[in-house]
Image: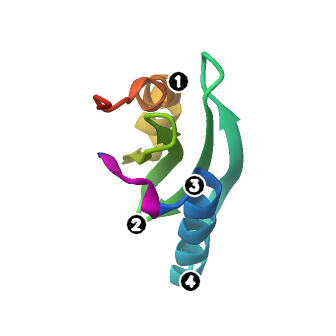
Amino acid sequence: TIVAQGAGGGNGHNQAGAALKAVKKTGDTVGSYGPVTFPGGRDAWQVTYTHAGLTDETYFFSACSGKAAMVVDVAASAAIFQQEQTTFGAVAASAEPTCS
């Protein structure tokens, strides 16, 4: 899932922090949380957790010179996630809305 919203959605760090709190409230297992740098130098924040047998990885970052807040979410079984994690990261890194 890829979502772009107005920058009123907050920066990547704030969005990831809010997502982390929500995940912890549900009791799901957090695998990782923190900043990542995509190829080309774009900074993002990422939360990875396990829920109902699926691994969910969500990236939060800005686009359009800070005018849009981006959320890229990938969920897969643990086995597929381990095999395809590099591909999922590449998809997130290449997600960019058409800026006007």
| Residue type at the position of mark 1 | Thr
Q: Is residue 5 magenta?
A: yes
- In space, the residues marked 4 and 2 are separated at their CA atoms by 15 Å
On residue 52, the disc is 2
Give the side of residue 30 with respect to residue 75, left or right.
right
Disc 2: CA contacts within 10 A as few (<14), some (14-19) or many (>=20) = few
Secondary-structure class at tag 1: helix
- In space, the residues marked 3 and 2 are separated at their CA atoms by 28 Å
Q: Which residue is mark 1?
A: 86
Secondary-structure class at tag 3: loop
Badge nearest the viewer, 4 or 2: 4
- In space, the residues marked 1 and 2 are separated at their CA atoms by 22 Å
Please tell me which residue is depicted at 44% across the width and 45% down the height of the picture. 67
Give the side of residue 99 with respect to residue 43, left or right.
left
Most extreme residue toward the bottom is 25
- In space, the residues marked 3 and 1 are separated at their CA atoms by 24 Å
